[in-house]
Image: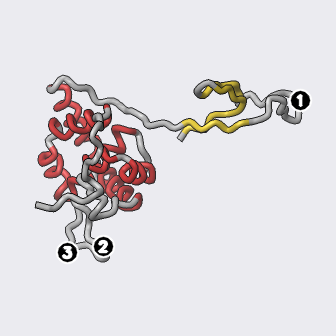
Amino acid sequence: MKEPTLANNDFEQYRKPTRREKFLTEMNKVVPWADLVAVIEPYYPEATKVGGRPPVGLERMLRIHCLQLWFNLSDPAVEEALYDSRAMSSFAGIDLGREPVSDETTVMRFRHLLEEHKLGAKIFEEVGRLLQRHGLRLSKGTIVDATIIAAPCSTKNADGERDPEMHQTKKGQQCYFGMKMHF
């Protein structure tokens, strides 16, 4: 058994599990990871067949792919989320005190492997059926950060009108005029 590192040591006495952590804990219990890995395994490269870096563990890549789908994350966004969220990195089995997160290119190659062999739809149909048997429902979610791009209230375009994309909004107790940039 590996010794815990400071990256996964829990020094927070009053830490409360988040909804994301509870969701991922439930997914960890109900998804038949071994069965899904068995579906992909014949297509996944072995260390002896690939030049360069050895491939990342299949189950880890599948878990990262699930995170992408469940939280509607792009390849770069899932890499960043795995560094940023302890719940997500723990779900994927990554100890940041010992190893880095799989980079966005590795994630993209795994996704392309699933697409090439048409495995994604088959896997997630099965996951959906299993979740329904446990009384759960699989749907898309998003992690959104809206940044306000401020503009002066009197800004007008060449026709003498305000830009139709600019609106007034309130963030906290402060009012802004501008545009929201979601990412």
- Residue at numbered disc 2: 53
Mark 3: few/some/many CA within 10 Å (<14, 14-19, 20+): few
Q: What whole-number distance in Å separates the C-alpha atoms at marks 1 and 3?
A: 66 Å
Horizontally, residue 173 falls left or right of residue 75, namely right
Of circles 1 and 3, which is in front? Answer: 1
Percent across and percent down for residue 124 are 25, 39
Task: Tell whether label 2 touches label 1 (CB within 8 Å).
Answer: no
- Residue at numbered disc 3: 48
Q: What whole-number distance in Å separates the C-alpha atoms at marks 1 and 2?
A: 58 Å
Residue type highlighted by circle 1? Gly
Mark 1: few/some/many CA within 10 Å (<14, 14-19, 20+): few
Q: Earlier in the sequence, mark 1 or mark 3?
A: 3
Q: Residue at x 88, y 31 (%)?
A: 159
Q: Nearer the viewer, residue 79 or 65?
A: 79
Q: What whole-number distance in Å separates the C-alpha atoms at marks 3 and 2?
A: 10 Å
Q: In the image as oriented, which residue stretches furthest toward the left?
A: 1
Q: Which residue is drawn at 18% across and 23% down?
A: 135
